[in-house]
Amino acid sequence: MKDPRTLEKVVSDQLIPWAAQSIYKSLNQAVIPHVVIVVNDEHFPNAQDEWDHHKSTEKYLTSLETPFENDPNLRSVVGALEPEVAPNIKTHADFLKNFYSSVIFVNIPRKAYLMRMDQQLATAYEVIKKRSSESYQRKDELGVLFKAERLERVFTAVFEHFSEEPDKPFNFLMDLLWQSHIPGDLDDNLFTFFRTFQGAVKPVESENLQHNAPQLFPLMTQILSSYIFLDSERNSNHVLSKSLRNYNYGPALRKAFEKFCETVLHCAFESKTGDARCCNVKANHGEKDHQGVDGKSLGKGNFRFAPKFDPSTFFEEWVNQIRKKLDNFQTELEEETKKTEEAALVEIAVKAHRRRLVEFLSNVDIASFLNIISVSVVCATACLST
Ligand SMILES: [Zn+2]
């Protein structure tokens, strides 16, 4: 590269504004991009090291350790960062390291050096392949890898989102969730039920409970216990149903709860002023900053649950509450049966379940609940009833 300023200009005009847009215009983006910079038309007749991409990367990053104070593009990007993040960014190189998962430079020689060109292009290809496969791997691990048949729909959703609301960040998670297939297993159904209830729960004393698991889940204890109870009464001998309930439903409840904590519950990080909370979830928090609903960075750091909320302890306590409810329902049912000897156990259980359902629906915003009832409650009911 003849003029070292050229690289600074590419960083300032292209690489950083693009990365900042990409990061802050999306929520729950599982991985941030890698960058591979191919420098053309290089001429190092005697310097073997220059063709080694590890060494050339080190060299270019050192040359980019230059201040950016006079650069209006970069000043505006750093100005939008949280006070605790901004002081760590002092040079052009810091920008690259902050906004990309990795930075690699590969030198490509002038036209005359055909053998060398061949080698360097092969290196560039290998580097791109390796980084792509790392991103692919990570998305796969997090369960957010877009399959080919879904990719088209995701592109359409992104296009529609930015055509209507260009300033609002696109939330990968929301669209992923609601475009997913109708669930098939009990844990999938329970998860959809949690998700549906979360979307429709009414605020309590004007506090929104959607991401407050310790308050949200107890509101579902009664109705879930009732579904489980009715289902086990319908499908098994009354005497055996107690042990079958634990065996059949415990693992599915745990799986659905863990999935909810991983993929739905927002990170509990709040801005210093307390008026913005991070909207990224545990599975997709990854290397990104804490981000508010507007996509802006609230600070650097990993996902965190609310203080005093430990998912596994909470789950054990919650399942114990469900067990207690089931025992109560069992006692109630037996007492009720003594009074009305004519009626079958299941009939009495159905009546009791209807009463509990009416009570449960008073806790939700019916309009939102009905909107999604066809894919959630019906599935959950169908699954619990088969
Ligand atoms: Zn966060």
Image (cartoon, rainbow, N blue to C red):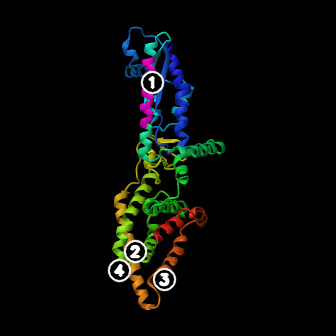
The type of residue carrying mark 3 is Glu
At a point 47% along the width and 37% down the height, the residue shown is 32
Between discs 3 and 4, the one toward the N terminus: 4
Q: Nearer the viewer, residue 223 or 81?
A: 223
Magenta-colored stretch includes residue 120: yes
Q: Give the residue pinned by disc 2.
A: 325
Between discs 2 and 4, the one toward the N terminus: 4
Q: Give the residue pinned by disc 3.
A: 347
At a point 57% along the width and 45% down the height, the residue shown is 154
Q: Does 63 appear above or below 282?
A: above
Task: For marks 3 and 2, give the one nearer the viewer.
Answer: 3
Between discs 3 and 2, the one toward the N terminus: 2
The type of residue carrying mark 1 is Ala
Q: Secondary structure at mark 3?
A: helix
Q: Residues within 10 Å of mark 2 (few under 14, many from 20)?
A: some
Q: Give the residue pinned by disc 1.
A: 124
Marks 3 and 4, how far apart at CA: 17 Å
The type of residue carrying mark 4 is Val
Q: Does 53 appear above or below 213?
A: above
Q: Position of residue 225 (x, y in %)?
A: 43, 71
Residue 239 tag number: 4
At a point 59% along the width and 42% down the height, the residue shown is 155
Q: Does 264 appear above or below 132?
A: below
Between discs 1 and 4, the one toward the N terminus: 1
* Magenta-highlighted residues: 118-134
Dominant secondary-structure state across the stretch colored magenta: helix
Task: For marks 2 and 4, give the one nearer the viewer.
Answer: 4
Marks 1 and 4, how far apart at CA: 68 Å
